[in-house]
């Protein structure tokens, strides 16, 4: 791009008049455009879907950023380019991008490809609509409702609400906002001022979005209280109970427990059933971040990992929150005296919020283990009181007119804090229709089988040291190169071990043979986390993985 | 879907053992999958792109929700379906969806199709990666940087920062969070407790996301102070100044002015230059919500509408905020005495935040007028201090390892409050490369020409009554049916006029001939808002529009 334009308007009227003849024809050339799309489709089929999933091809074509910048010629200019040059650009983008569908991409919690889902995504992009009103998205308003119902049924809820969000972080933040609003509905209009300090409870191995959300929603990261975990990385209900009591004694108001089903690094499942007891005791909103692990609900074999998710909290009658000039107080009362108490409170100008909440929430990302494609993130709610809409609505009259000729409850957009909202249900719906719940179950079960195989092989090989028995499809391990074996007691062992994974990672990236992530965790130095669930993976890819780690790290 | 599964784990070990032979082959059948994708692509080309943009075909195939639910057979079941049935489903989804690319879809701020952008979107979906680290998105990390630079250059900033967000609402909320964090960095860890009440200023015609954001971020909708507008719907700088003074005198701390370039209904542009004066005077963060209007920056003729956007606020030395036990105080000081003051403050345990911010922000959605496809929303920042990352980061060690072999500043994910983040830059980049800045300028200019034509035609016809001269590409008008003409003074005139637009809308939807929205605004009853910018529109579509309104409303 040459130069920015000055903010002058000197010649604009003359130019406008001269251009009036341009009116007759539209700017778009359909035949040229469709030809380009056709050619791009062919490139996608060949470069991304055929080569990109072929184990004989590289997972990545590593380039240093400076070199890649030159190769891609990213600069945006005043004049356009011919079609053949643009098609070369399409090829270049494909060439230098990571092949996340490749069977040897073990790097993230997304991988693989599902062709039905991908077809749904192409269709979504082509139809280019927004999921906010029935009038512009009739098919998708109904479809989203049905998909959410299907997911809720797997949780064990026959009724409820929900919404697709742009990622699991947003789902977690919505849960936070809903829990806060339920307890203190005035927060929507008045903000947090005048409210007692609110606290959230989660484990240190939960997703970082809990902290991000607390910061974003004005609650503050320090008000996220970290509950101890057991050796496997699962939240300890006894410590949760202690921490809640402590927080209360320090004057804060606990309002949310964010449990995790499938932690990011270790794949641990918090014991939901026992946590639900604690939540019930303290009358806290129980949110389950099952962004990663939620897909086990499809499997009869493995859904026990989320036992307790179907429980939900009833704010029993007999409790209310008194709001008076000095602050808030949670207070118990006998139900038969409720009317009397309310009358007294009205007289003495104390506001009463009677807690009758029946709700908790689950965040579940089918874009992860189910291979629905980025992004597909559902927030599921037990709530039947339209809490989502009450909490988030702004009733914009230009979009959500109340005098429409159809049922305006179908205009679901005001449930979101977004305005434009992508259609994320079609890809999952089409994939689900294609393979059925049984097919998705098979996918989940197979991932567990692959993990078991991988773990057994690791145990047979020298040099692979597991952090622990995997509960899910994350396998965390150290690779101990020959030079470090038997030296566990030496002074610099941990320091040297910490440097192994980054070097192996660098080598595999530069050779492009596969991808797997590493990280430290607490006092445990850098270890690999291999994620195995792609439906494209076979036994030979797992054998390759182990051989490749050995090959790359043998001399370290 | 038949039934949910119980949370039992009785037979799982036996089953796992039996399934071990499944390991050898992957689940995915590439040839069948690619065949399906091929067939879907053909359906998209025919149903969505050819028929869907043909003026001889309908814009919508209206069905009542009950009927549509039956037609689509949405239910999700245990078993999968054969390919031919799935392809019929793809056709059905296309058939009953709104053709938002149709030249006679005037309903929203998105419309039309750009084939290069669509090709970029297909490629994005196929490559299925997340924009959070260079290692999984090398091409897109560099590309996003370049696209943001290109957009910033049009604003008039040679340096700065930015990020693509899932929609303009999120961009507006980010601006709010950044402005708040800049002023009170402790808010990230400690939340809003202990801070003075914060206030935001915007016009009543600004986008509803400003209020939604205030609620979401814990600030509260009541702390969004609405500034008066002039007859055209533009914020009045004099009233802004008054309202800020009033808010201060009432003890709140104003921290953000959210101006609008292109309001949703009227398409008004707030006078940025004069608002910048007020922001500078009061040292407030000036955010410009140009989600809709930002694209005028491509046009030499029309960018004057945003004059002043390139100004940015410098928190001049000479001011600081004192935080002490009783609250906050904004205080002026002489620069040469800063060190002395700081020393004194340290001694008396008062915390000093010296304001040296150089920042404001612009939200701009190329998915609207530039036809980049949903979603493509940029937040642009003048800031060069890495504020975005400081404000939003959580430093997750599993993703943003600091011992990587490449420059970890390329791992841009921690700038976002999302974790998974879609790639929204490729579609805009490819389209921009294809037509150049000149081509995008032409698109913007042509939209203005179309609007001028439409307005002139309306003035020639009886029954079309404009709300005012359009400043942008929103044309707001009442259609006065013959039975109401000349009866402006009668008692029930407004009531009867209010009912006209909804009936015409119902008729056009049910006949499927075109789509346009209506709404009330303040004390003005229901009027149409026709949005004209799609590059597929020609003069005959505009003539059709006027004829069709007359045809549908003539008997009312």
Image: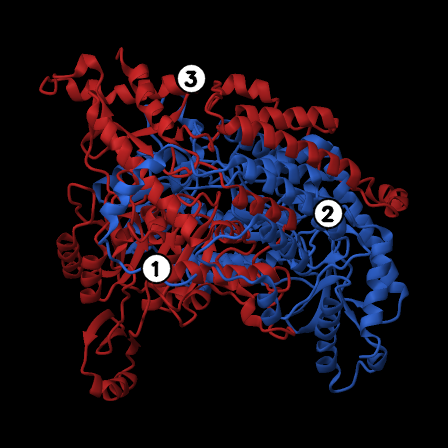
Chain colours: A red, B blue
Whether residue B125 appears in this view of the structure is: yes
Question: Which sits in the foreground, B291 or A542?
Answer: A542
Residue A142: x and y, percent? 55, 63
Residue under disc 3 on the same chain as residue under disc 1: yes
Mark 3 surroundings within 10 Å by alpha-carbon count, few (fewer than 14), some (14 through 19), many (20 or more): some
Q: How far apart are marks 3 and 1 (CA)?
A: 43 Å
CB within 8 Å, label 3 to label 2? no
Q: Distance between the residues labelled 3 and 2?
A: 43 Å
The chain that hosts pointer 2 is: B
Number of the label disc, if any, that sits on residue A510: 3
Horizontal arrangement in the rendering, residue B444 relative to residue A392 (left or right) = right
Question: Which sits in the foreground, A23 or A477?
Answer: A477
Number of the label disc, if any, that sits on residue B87: none
Horizontal arrangement in the rendering, residue A267 relative to residue B525 (left or right) = left
Which image quarter: residue B249?
A: bottom left
Q: What element carries label 1?
A: helix
Residue displayed at 25% across by 86% down: A344
- The disc, 3 or 1, on the residue closer to the chain's N-terminal end is 1
The chain that hosts pointer 1 is: A
Residue displayed at 45% across by 47% down: B179
Residue B408 position (above or below residue A149): above
Which image quarter: residue A552?
A: top left
Which residue in the protein does label 1 denote? A155
């Amino acid at each position: 791009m040459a130069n920015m334009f000055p903010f002058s308007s000197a010649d604009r009227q003359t130019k406008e008049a001269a251009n009036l003849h341009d009116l007759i024809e539209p700017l778009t050339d359909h035949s040229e455009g469709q030809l380009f799309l056709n050619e791009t489709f062919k490139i996608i089929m060949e470069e991304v879907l055929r080569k990109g999933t072929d184990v004989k091809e590289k997972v990545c074509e590593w380039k240093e950023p400076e070199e890649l910048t030159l190769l891609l010629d990213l600069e945006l200019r005043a004049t356009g380019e011919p079609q053949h040059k643009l098609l070369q650009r399409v090829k270049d983008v494909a060439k230098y991008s990571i092949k996340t569908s490749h069977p040897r991409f073990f790097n993230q919690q997304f991988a693989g490809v599902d062709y039905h889902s991908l077809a749904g995504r192409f269709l979504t992009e082509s139809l280019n609509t927004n999921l906010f009103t029935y009038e512009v998205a009739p098919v998708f308003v109904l479809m989203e409702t049905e998909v959410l119902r299907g997911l809720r049924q797997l949780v064990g809820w026959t009724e409820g609400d929900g919404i697709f969000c742009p990622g699991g972080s947003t789902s977690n933040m919505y849960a936070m906002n809903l829990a806060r609003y339920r307890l203190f509905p005035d927060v929507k209009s008045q903000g947090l001022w005048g409210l007692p300090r609110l606290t959230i409870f989660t484990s240190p191995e939960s997703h970082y979005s809990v902290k991000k959300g607390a910061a974003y929603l004005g609650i503050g990261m320090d008000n996220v209280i970290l509950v101890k975990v057991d050796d496997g990385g699962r939240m300890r209900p006894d410590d949760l109970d202690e921490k809640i009591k402590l927080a209360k004694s320090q004057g804060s108001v606990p309002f949310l427990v964010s449990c995790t089903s499938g932690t990011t690094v270790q794949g641990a499942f918090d014991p939901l059933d026992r946590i639900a007891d604690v939540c019930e005791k303290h009358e806290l909103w129980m949110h389950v971040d099952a962004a990663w692990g939620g897909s086990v609900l499809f499997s009869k074999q493995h859904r026990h990992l989320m036992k307790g998710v179907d429980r939900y909290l009833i704010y029993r009658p007999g409790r209310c929150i008194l709001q008076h000039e000095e602050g808030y107080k949670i207070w118990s009362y006998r139900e038969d005296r409720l009317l009397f108490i309310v009358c007294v409170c009205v007289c003495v100008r104390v506001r009463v919020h009677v807690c009758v909440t029946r709700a908790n929430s689950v965040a579940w990302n089918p874009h992860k283990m189910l291979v629905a494609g980025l992004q597909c993130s559902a927030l599921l709610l037990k709530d039947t009181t339209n809490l989502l809409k009450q909490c988030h609505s702004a009733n914009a009259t230009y979009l959500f007119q109340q005098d429409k000729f159809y049922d305006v409850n179908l205009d679901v957009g005001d449930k979101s804090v977004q305005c434009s909202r992508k259609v994320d249900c079609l890809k999952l719906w089409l994939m689900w229709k294609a393979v059925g719940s049984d097919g998705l179950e098979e996918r989940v079960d197979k991932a567990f089988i692959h993990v078991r195989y991988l773990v057994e092989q690791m145990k047979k090989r020298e040099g692979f040291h597991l952090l622990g028995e995997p509960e899910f499809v994350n396998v965390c391990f150290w690779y101990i190169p020959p030079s470090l074996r038997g030296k566990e007691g030496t002074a610099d062992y941990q320091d040297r071990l910490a440097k192994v994974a980054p070097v192996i990672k660098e080598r595999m990236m530069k050779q492009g043979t596969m991808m797997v992530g590493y990280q430290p965790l607490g006092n445990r130095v850098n270890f690999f986390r291999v994620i195995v669930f792609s439906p494209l993976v076979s036994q030979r890819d797992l054998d390759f993985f182990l051989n490749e780690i050995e090959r790359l790290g043998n001399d370290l």
